[in-house]
Amino acid sequence: MEAKFDTLLNAILALLSILNPITVVPLYSELTRDLGKQDRNRLFNTAVTVGFLTLFILMFTGRWVMETVFQIHVAEFRIAGGILLTVIAVKQIVFYDPDEYRTTPGKVMEMGIVPMAVPLLVGPGAIVTSILVLDRDGWLIASIALLVNFAIAWLVVRFSPALSRVMGRFGTLVIARILWIFIAAIGAHFLITGISEVFGVNLPILGRSF
């Protein structure tokens, strides 16, 4: 029982690190600053719902597409995913651009899908991580971890205006940078695990494999 809880907690934290809803707090607040409370809440609900459905579908179909269409194996995907996560983390830590996803508000529901759901909540890193968690832990734990993460994401984005005021821009950036460091470590772990599988090398540093 304890082992299953540890596995679930590990899956939740892995997804939480890469979804990282705290990072979207300032931007969500900025994008919705001219909206009324009702429109803002509709927008947040749309963003989280679309993000969850998108990632849920991609989590279960990604491996099939990977193996059937592109004919690549999980170990190779781990290597590519590890490189991708590491590059994304380094980019966000070293070359952060606060205006990268800024957009002129159009229709409320459209903005809830792009950019708020994709790519702000569900980006390449989230897709890679969800597929690898599914491969490692099975559909039940992966599904629960995804559901828990989007429940957390809903709470964060729902109260993003208040959180933005409480934390301030500096506090938000500090928390975001710390989480991106963890994402870089997860990416390095994916990369090392994939290389060890491809070359049949058992590295003690791996501990448990993603």
Image: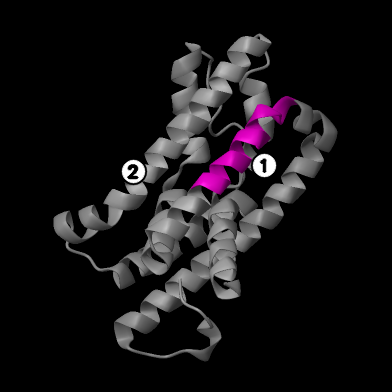
Measured from the top left, where is residue 146 in percent x and y? 49, 49
The kind of residue on which mark 1 rests is Ile
Let me know if residue 176 appears in the view: yes
The kind of residue on which mark 2 rests is Ile
- State which quarter of the image contains the N terminus: bottom right
**Could you give the CA–CA distance between mark 1 and mark 2, rounded to whole angstroms?**
24 Å
The label number, if any, that marks residue 57 in the structure image: 2
Extreme residue in the front direction: 1
- Disc 1 target residue: 22
Measured from the top left, where is residue 181 in percent x and y? 64, 61
Q: Residue at the spot x=48%, y=58% of the render?
A: 85
Residue in the foreground of this view, choosing between 38 and 76 = 38
Q: Residue at the spot x=51%, y=70% of the render?
A: 188
- State which quarter of the image contains the C terminus: bottom left
Secondary structure beneath disc 2?
Answer: helix
Q: Which residues are magenta?
A: 147-161
> First in sequence: mark 1 or mark 2?
1
Residue in the foreground of this view, choosing between 202 and 90 = 202
Let me know if residue 35 appears in the view: no
